[in-house]
Amino acid sequence: MDWFTAPGYWLGRLVFQRALAGVYLFAFVGAALQFRALIGERGMLPVPRYVRRVPFRRAPSLFGLRYSDRLFAGCAWTGAALAGALAAGAGDAVPPGVAMGLWAVVWALYLSIVNVGQTWYAFGWESLLLEAGFLAVFLGNARTGLPVLVLWLLRWLLFRVEFGAGLIKMRGDPCWRKLTCLYFHHETQPVPGPLSWFFHHLPKPLHRVECAAGHFTQLCVPVLLFAPQPVASYAAGAIAATQLWLVLSGNFAWLNWLTVALALSPGYARDWFGPFVERLLAGDRDTLRLLGDNPFPEAPPVYVRARVYRYRFTTWRELRATGDWWHRTPVRAYLAPTRLAGTAPGGPARSEPE
């Protein structure tokens, strides 16, 4: 490594850029497929209403200048196409200045989406993607050496993410300090994965070891990212292995907008849940596409109600007896039976007795 470039890191740059472009691709495709029901002109939290209320300087976005569903779709699919090209290696097939331009356009398009995404884009991983994407603009391509400054900024970003996550745990729920959080974490995480049931039923001493190992990886290992090689690479490998373990035991990477929002907090759903119910009652096609299966395939419902349940994983005995992975217990009503007050789609809703 010399003062300005690090030519020996060409493979790391290649893997990072291709993986980041892949994340961008999924993000743009997700936005293109879901935006109409979420933030479109007739969505639950419409962009036009948001940009009238929020000054451009607070949320700079292409859509602050002009918005239409067609323009949004065009931007999202353009971003997906560019991200797909970068993931396939297009950035290395063009001059460095052009490659920087491609990464900059992708970043600007996604920034425009996030800054008008409101509740749906108010999660930390969106900011993380944008920060990593901004640094990727200056990474260069196969025709240039990797800039040392950008390399250190990427290490600093990874350090902040991991160390910050560790500090949040230590300063948060006491169960993380007592090493007992994993007694119930696997069944209460936002979207348990296919293997989460089995992780939940691991012996408690193993849960404590797993929790302590997580603390070590998040609070101690990140410091080694700034050590000389090969120590820094070993530290990065340990962090990557921990992330793969988390992917196996859970599914944070695919946290749905709609499925878990009520579980996060009633206040989180305050702004959008009413419009969501209205669109279910109206049979809005874009809203129904957000659901895994259409619960009303024949015709829109006359009434909709919502209830809160407490879910837990079944025991081994319950699984053998019933074949069910989950057991649920009613907690309370969240929304009384509700119908549309008028006949026009998207009209106001009101509660009615059953």
Image (cartoon, rainbow, N blue to C red):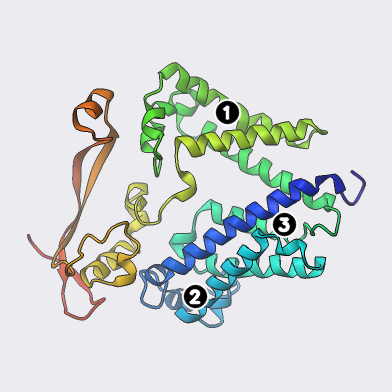
Name the residue at 24% across, 67% down.
280
Residue 347's disc is: none
Name the residue at 86% across, 54% down.
145
Please name the amino acid that badge 1 sits on. His
Name the residue at 77% across, 57% down.
139
Name the residue at 73% across, 44% down.
155
The spot of residue 129 in percent (x, y) is 60, 55
Q: Which residue is mark 3?
A: 135
Q: Which numbered disc flags the more N-terminal residue, 1 or 3? A: 3
Judge whether 187 appears above or below 340 on screen.
Answer: above
* Label 3 packing within 10 angstroms: few (<14), some (14-19), many (20+): some
State the image quarter where residue 58 is shown. Answer: bottom right
Q: Which residue is mark 2?
A: 73
**Real-space Cα distance between discs 1 and 3?**
28 Å
Which type of secondary structure does the marked residue at label 3 adopt?
A: helix
Which type of secondary structure does the marked residue at label 2 adopt?
A: helix
Q: Residue furthest top?
A: 205
Q: Which numbered disc flags the more N-terminal residue, 2 or 1? A: 2
The spot of residue 103 in percent (x, y) is 69, 65
**Real-space Cα distance between discs 2 and 3?**
26 Å
| In the image: residue 34, left or right of residue 217 | left
* Label 2 packing within 10 angstroms: few (<14), some (14-19), many (20+): many
Viewer-closest of 260 and 193: 193
| In the image: residue 18, left or right of residue 342 | right
Judge whether 101 appears above or below 210 on screen.
Answer: below
* Label 1 packing within 10 angstroms: few (<14), some (14-19), many (20+): many
Q: Which residue is mark 1?
A: 215
